[in-house]
Image (cartoon, rainbow, N blue to C red):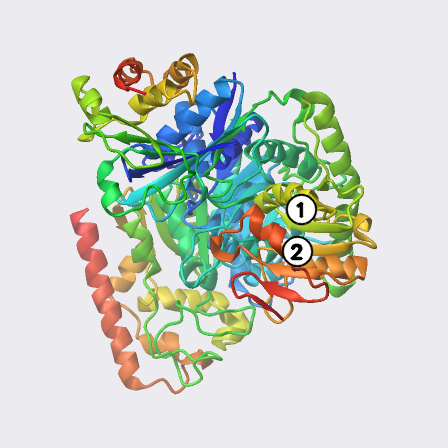
Amino acid sequence: MKKIATGNKAVAEAVKQVVPAVVAAYPITPQTEIVEQIAEFVTSGELKSRYIAVESEHSAMAACIGASITGVRTFTATSSHGLLYMHEMTNWAAGARLPIVMANVNRSLGPGWNIWAEHTDAMQERDTGWLQVYVSTVQEAYDAIIMAFRIAEHHDVLLPVMVNLDGFLLSHIMQPLDTIEPGDFIPPLSLPYAIDVTNPAGYGGLTGPDQHFKFRWDIERSMRDSVTVIEETEKEFAKRFGRRYGFTENYRCEDAEIIIVSLGTLGKETEVAIDLLRKEGIRAGSMRLRWLRPFPDLSLLKGKQVVVIDRDYSFGRGGILATEIVAQTKEDVFSVIAGLGGQEVTYEDVADFVRKRRVGTEFWFGVNANV
Amino acid sequence: MFEIRIHSRGGQGGVTAARLLALAAIHDGKYATAAPFYGAERRGAPIVSFVRIDETPIRVYSQIKKPDMVVVLDASVMDVVDVLQGLKSGGKVLINSQQKKEFAGYAFCNVDLTGIALREKLVVSGSPILNTPVIGALAKMGIVSVDSAKKAIREMFTDERNVKVAEAAYQELIV
Amino acid sequence: MIDRRVAKARSPIRSQPLQELDTIAEIPKEEYVLKCSSACAGCSDSLALRYVLKAAGPDTVLVIPACCTSVIQGIYPNTAFNVPVYNIAFGAAAACASGMSNAFRGAGKKTNVIVYAGDGGTLDIGIQAMSGAFERGTDFLYICYDNEAYGNTGMQRSGATPLGAKTTTTPTGKTDFKKDIDGIIAAHDPPYMATAAAAYPQDLFKKVQKALSFRGPSFIHVLAPCPPGWRYSTEKTVEMGKLAVKSGIWVLYEREYGKLSIGAQSKVAMKKPIPLEDYLSPQGRFKGIDPKNVEILKQRIAKNFAKLAAEEASS
């Protein structure tokens, strides 16, 4: 049956298919529908999970950590201030090598209170050891959650995964959704170091300078190994369920002279801008970055004029995505800061960014100044 | 791409109407998205919802600026909001009203959705249900097929009166 | 299953009767705090933990936030505890245990989940997570060992530091009262809560066994005198705990489904307490305490006695 669902609902539906033993979450706009739906599934018996209605996001992640280390599958969802409130524990989850999956509904940070889409929340988590994927459709949100469990739980990875979807733009939009039966695509979780009372061990105790760096390196090694695991998982998903994903989604890039790089729903809006620009004879293409961690190989951008749209910012440095891309390609870009706090950005605006590009500068949309 | 903007007040079912319409369009074999424009959730405040229908996947997430059609579930919204803003020349307008209204350059229709809902006593928390009859009216205007409209309503509501009000709106709307 | 379900469940989960102990010789010989621990000399935290784990037995997981116990457990790759120990960030122990308990119960396991946290991790930074876990009826035992300051960072004041006590952040003595964490816990109405002291291991042992026999959250507040922090000589650790009870500044009691019973040792103290000065004067932290503060402390002891006696009489 053809279904229609919001991004939030799709996340909850995916969680229902994967059946985590424990879901611990705290409601926050615009993520609330995810926890409401999961609580409803659990209450009605459709989902055989334990739902812990924790008193904060810090506790949500702590509860996921406590559950996960016993060797069971866990899930949480949050947004914005909630994500930052659990920041201490997101570091802990990755350091403890726990395959927790989280949906983060991207939203700006206060003050002033603003509930609309922005990527700065997740960007502030980029150094924690979590894998991060950004999605652009309801279907992709659903598929990404299911794949996230398989990737996180793979023994070459054993790191948590954050699936990011744009607040309201994607969390609340209704689009078609095809649900799947994952079957053995999601094998039973086997955590190699789960708590075993017959073989007691200490977890996360005092670790001296001669040992600690080894654990850090081990995270990085797994992060690098995760590239292959992500590729294999997405390949296997395409084989079984017919939908293909990659580290980036490239649109009309083959012969492009100019490539626009963006994240999330803006990446889809940009494709419409590309069609517009092509009609004007401008050879532009769109690269929608899906995985931010591990950061993909963007050699496709070499020698092209690159326009990067950041829905985030690092004050005193620049657009975070632009900064990362420049660091990898060693080439200047036209850095556009647009869409902060849900600022409306249309495909016509995106086309205009391209028309008015000045590589090597930064442009704040709405402020209308190249700086 | 066919773009529809729905005007209503918080709690009147404008968001559900958008969702039903998108679902019906999908049943017609098309692509569709329905997006409410969200602020803080306030009952009674004027709100807009957007529906896009197309033959190919829809990649636009920004708000609808130049709609092909405007639906007004609560005519009192017209006192505070310019519902015709950006409406394409010759664009369609559907208003929930007993009175016929005319604006030059647009294809106007009106139907008394409130009256239809009240006749069937389809009232929740004191508000007549408008989201299901409006789908019948939209079917009459050719936006979605009647079969798909009924199918969408039955998927989302178990009370068969919702189909009945949609049929009534279909009958009573004069195109 | 929604976590709240267990909140008001009133049936013990264990079928075997609780051990009745007449002498300390009947406490199990098995050791779970091993000889390689890195506790300070005269540490009563590890003394208390020794009996906690003897009472709990091997089917137990210890959750510890940042506290003295995270030092005492030893340095990776070694561990001084013969049960699994999960370390978690300072404010997160109860929440972590909440997840762990739900995972075990969901898998049909009866494994004891015990939080063993200091006063800072309980009264201060961890109070939100603890309150949440108690409100949700989490099936676990929360033990707060109270050395009345932030011990492993070198004795800074905590919410548990008593009036007049010197710490590194109250160099002239604390000007505020000790927070009534037991009153806060009691407001959550757990099936079982108790106070204990490392100086009375048999009492502690029994209370831990009893606490673990209840389904839902239980709480034990253990006084844990600290030689370097309180500034007394190491051999006096047990004596210090006993003086605290005898003077009445620490009262041993338990509350079962809200019904209070005051311990025998404290009943004696309530009839005829030793002078508070006998407890204060061996401790460097109270050196030079304002006599007015000593009077205030005495008044509060008397007030607390009266309150507890009235509660016991009415319950």
From this view, report whether residue A278 is shown above or below residue C270.
above
Instruction: Identify the residue under disc 2.
Output: A355
Left or right of A271 in this view: A62: left
> In the rendering, which numbered label is found on residue A277?
1
Left or right of A236 in this view: B88: left
Q: Residue at (36%, 51%) from the top-left corner?
A: C194
Cα–Cα gap, marks 1 and 2? 8 Å
Q: Nearer the viewer, residue C102 or C198?
A: C102
Asked if labels 2 and 1 touch by Cβ distance under 8 angstroms, the answer is yes
Name the residue furthest front.
B104
Q: Nearer the viewer, residue B116 or A85?
A: B116
Q: Position of residue C136 (x, y in %)?
A: 38, 42
Residue A205 appears anywhere in the view:
no
From this view, report whether residue C158 is shown above or below residue A127.
below
| Residues at discs 1 and 2 both on one chain | yes
Quarter of the figure with the C terminus of chain B: top left
* Quadrant of the rendered image containing residue C179: bottom left
Residue neighbourhood size for the residue with mark 2, other residues' Cα within 10 Å, grouped as few (<14), some (14–19), many (≥20): few
* Quadrant of the rendered image containing residue A178: top right
Q: Position of residue B108 (x, y in %)?
A: 31, 30
Q: Which of the two discs, 1 and 2, labels the residue nearer the N terminus?
A: 1
Amino acid at circle 1: Leu
Amino acid at circle 2: Arg
